[in-house]
Image (cartoon, rainbow, N blue to C red):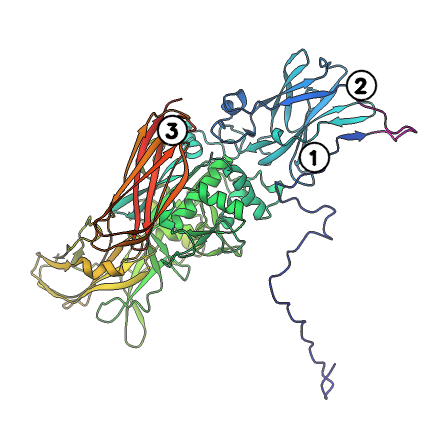
């Protein structure tokens, strides 16, 4: 086809069909499809003959050694689960950890004769098992013939043989199907597939050869075996706690975690590598890319789901996802981190939830959080695009990093909250904490992004009428002010800020920032003289609905009188730093004598902020101003987290396994207005599965009592966690400790 001049006319591409693209397969590229589902079952033959059939068919194999029974010793009190630290898993199957021996008892039809009889225990995972890929693994009882999974005869008595089996420390993690195969001169005879004999193999932080080995018993107990979490939130100078039931041992949770990898189409052969598992899961825990576990929502409207502040544990979320095959609504950063923590601990990867107070999220990928002021020193909210999250939660998981230089293994940051894309998907990590601390941000994965979250500078710019920006103040210590996690074995917090950064202003910190710049991170190098007037904002503990005084202190450190034209703004903000509405604005002119201080007191009435309050009840005060005599800018910021009322939780009855107990929750509405559409949720690891109750209305000043009967299924210390949530009042919590006797 051509035009009149004979010039070829480019043909248009065919139109793209409407609707979702069909899923691409591996057809035409490999003989077998890539196995990516742990639930698919391979077709394993019961009889596998070596010879051709005769006139009367195949010879019978019944006259040779026959298998009568296979006992995987899977009960919680038996040897396998106790030695492998898996006795807490609420499952009818055997759960073991790789790199460590477990035992299987095989009953034959006659005594086993080592010199004559040949048998193997076979483990199969995925639809297309291959020995070379580690998806088919025969385990032999003799030293002369071994596979990557070691086998030995532990005991042989009469017809019963006890065999010790040690999975390779780098084997695939997942659910294996177990068979026992006997070799005869004519062929192989296998046991039929019995679902009850399936074996779950997990990562093993107790074995030095495993990539997730953690050589600290206290940390292992906390970061693998502890179900009872504490997640920190609020403000760095007023830290609040949120209890969480990780529930990694609850019924169905292990299968739900394996389903997450299936849903991601993660090749079975990659599931022995904790780096690949953690990275893939960081994408699948959010629903931005592949219909993952949790749908994020920061809008405040949770009509079509559960408010993030209402959840009390991971179990309900994971079981809903694996049951419905649809994302669960809704989540914010701590929910993503908590459910990710459950996933990692359930599979045996040591992990913990970390909270970074004043976490930078800038929109242009530098080491600056830009705040724009007008010529008079007032913040320009329309042009200020970067946000500072009051706090942000992510995870750390412990593993070696053979893909990185020596010394960069250990704790790795992974983050499932969808913020920025990494390799085309919303995910983050694993990024080495050591690499972040030392500015080695060129190494995978996403170290530069995490580095900026804890090291950005807050730069105030003055914008002139012609649009030019001039830096007027730089705060280098505001971001990453405090980084916390739960202390191992205790109900207290642990400050791990020093794991991420050197002390502010130290020589080491300067060296790290210079190194980060070599790898492309740009920071503000303005060397601005410090203003001779300092603005100090108070620390306050205020309850929702209180009137209070907000006192600002202007300190003159010069030998001359100073006058400050100040702007004091109070806003209701989301915890992400995004402003919802402004409820306070004052413009005082303050005169300060030389080397003196003056306090400016602002009265804040509850009626000014209560109607505009959004979830988590954060008030953000920012004070800026210009010193008349020097034209210098002064500024200070403060987040005030309003404290909510508490729930009363009491437990009564005989605290013994399988004995009925009673939990009583009490709450009084402290406000004059009604609370509508109220949900109360309650659960406790090993004692109570998730429950909820709905109240359409709680009138102002009235009380409610909810009583729930429960039956503990496990001995030991535990805790009931309760939340109350409605549109007008979020984050109301209560808890009660209980110790259950056997």
Where is residue 551, by image quadrant? bottom left
Task: Point out the residue furthest to the top here.
Answer: 158
Task: Answer whether labels 3 and 2 touch (C-beta < 8 Å).
Answer: no
Front of the two marks 1 and 3: 3
Q: Which residue is mark 2?
A: 63
Task: Answer whether labels 1 and 3 touch (C-beta < 8 Å).
Answer: no
Residue 402: percent from left, percent from top: 54, 39
Indicate left or right for 688 with 150 as reference: left
Q: Identify which residue, 479 or 112, lies in the foreground.
A: 112
Residue 56 part of the magenta segment: yes
- What crowding class fits label 1: few (fewer than 14 Cα within 10 Å), some (14-19), or many (20 or more)? few
Indicate left or right for 401 with 523 as reference: right
Above/below status of 22 relative to 542: below
Q: Identify which residue, 116 or 132, lies in the foreground.
A: 116
Residue 724: percent from left, percent from top: 32, 46
Residue 407: percent from left, percent from top: 46, 38
- What crowding class fits label 3: few (fewer than 14 Cα within 10 Å), some (14-19), or many (20 or more)? some
Q: Which residue is mark 1?
A: 131
Which residue corresponds to the image point at 72% horizontal and 34% vertical from the top-left?
44
Q: Which residue is mark 3?
A: 660
Indicate left or right for 406 with 16 as reference: left
Quadrant assignment for the N terminus: bottom right
């Amino acid at each position: 086809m051509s035009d009149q001049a004979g010039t070829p006319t480019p043909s248009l591409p065919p139109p793209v069909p409407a609707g979702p693209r069909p899923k691409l397969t591996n057809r035409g590229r490999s003989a077998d499809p890539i196995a990516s589902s742990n639930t698919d079952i391979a077709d394993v033959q019961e009889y596998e003959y070596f010879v051709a059939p005769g006139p009367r068919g195949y010879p019978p194999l019944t006259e040779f050694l026959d298998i009568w029974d296979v006992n995987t010793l899977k009960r919680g009190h038996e040897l396998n689960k106790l030695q492998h630290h898996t006795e807490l898993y609420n499952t009818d199957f055997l759960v073991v950890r790789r790199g460590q021996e477990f035992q299987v008892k095989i009953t034959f039809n006659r005594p086993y004769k080592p010199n004559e009889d040949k048998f193997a225990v076979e483990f199969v995972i995925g639809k297309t098992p291959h020995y070379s890929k580690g998806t088919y693994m025969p385990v032999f009882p003799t030293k002369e013939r071994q596979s990557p999974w070691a086998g030995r005869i532990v005991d042989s008595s009469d017809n019963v043989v006890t065999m010790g089996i040690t999975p390779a420390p780098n084997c695939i993690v997942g659910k294996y199907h177990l068979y026992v195969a006997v070799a005869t001169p004519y062929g192989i005879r296998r046991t039929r597939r019995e679902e009850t004999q399936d074996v779950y193999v997990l990562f093993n932080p107790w074995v030095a050869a495993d990539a997730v080995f953690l050589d600290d018993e206290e940390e292992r107990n906390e970061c693998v075996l502890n179900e009872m979490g504490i997640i920190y939130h609020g403000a760095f100078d007023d830290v609040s706690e949120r209890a969480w039931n990780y529930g990694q041992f609850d019924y169905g949770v292990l299968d739900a975690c394996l389903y997450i990898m299936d849903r991601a189409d993660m090749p079975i052969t990659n599931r022995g590598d904790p780096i690949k598992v953690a990275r893939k899961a960081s994408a699948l825990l959010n629903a931005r890319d592949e219909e993952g576990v949790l749908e994020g929502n920061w809008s405040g409207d949770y009509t079509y789901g559960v408010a993030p502040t209402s959840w009390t544990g991971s179990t309900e979320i994971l079981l809903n996802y694996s049951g419905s095959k649809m994302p669960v609504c809704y989540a914010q950063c701590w929910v993503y981190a908590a459910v990710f923590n459950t996933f990692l601990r359930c599979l045996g990867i040591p992990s913990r939830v970390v909270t970074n107070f004043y976490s930078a999220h800038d929109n242009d990928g530098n080491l600056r959080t830009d705040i724009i002021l007008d010529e008079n020193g007032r913040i320009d909210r329309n042009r200020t695009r970067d946000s500072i999250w009051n706090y942000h939660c992510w995870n750390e998981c412990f593993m070696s990093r053979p893909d990185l230089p020596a010394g960069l293994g250990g704790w790795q940051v992974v983050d499932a909250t969808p913020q920025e894309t990494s390799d085309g998907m919303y995910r983050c990590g694993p990024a080495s904490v050591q690499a972040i601390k030392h500015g080695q941000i060129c190494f995978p994965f996403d170290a530069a992004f995490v580095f900026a979250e804890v090291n950005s500078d807050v730069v105030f710019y003055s914008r002139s009428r012609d649009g030019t920006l001039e830096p007027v103040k730089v705060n280098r210590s505001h971001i990453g002010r405090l980084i916390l996690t739960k202390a191992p074995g205790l109900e207290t917090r642990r400050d791990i800020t020093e794991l991420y950064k050197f002390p502010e202003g130290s020589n080491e910190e300067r060296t790290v920032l210079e190194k980060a710049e070599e790898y492309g991170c740009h920071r503000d190098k303005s060397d601005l003289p410090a203003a001779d007037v300092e603005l100090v904002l108070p620390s306050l503990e205020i309850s929702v609905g209180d009137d209070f005084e907000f006192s600002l202190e202007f300190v003159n450190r010069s030998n001359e009188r100073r006058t400050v034209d100040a702007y004091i703004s109070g806003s209701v903000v989301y915890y992400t730093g995004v402003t919802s509405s402004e409820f306070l604005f004052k413009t005082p002119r303050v005169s300060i004598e030389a080397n003196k201080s003056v306090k400016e007191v602002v009265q804040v009435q509850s009626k000014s902020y209560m109607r505009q309050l959004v979830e988590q009840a954060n008030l953000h005060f920012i004070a800026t101003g210009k010193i008349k005599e020097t034209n210098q800018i002064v500024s200070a910021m403060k987040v005030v987290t309003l404290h909510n009322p508490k729930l009363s939780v009491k437990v009564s009855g005989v605290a013994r396994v399988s004995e009925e107990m009673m939990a009583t929750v009490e709450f009084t509405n402290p406000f004059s207005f009604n609370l509508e559409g109220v949900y109360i949720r309650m659960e406790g690891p090993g004692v109570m599965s998730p429950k909820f109750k709905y109240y359409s209305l709680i009138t102002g000043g009235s009380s409610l009592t909810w009583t729930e009967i429960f039956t503990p299924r496990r001995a030991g210390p535990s805790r009931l966690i309760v939340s109350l949530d409605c549109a007008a009042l979020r984050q109301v919590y209560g808890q009660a400790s209980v110790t259950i006797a056997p």
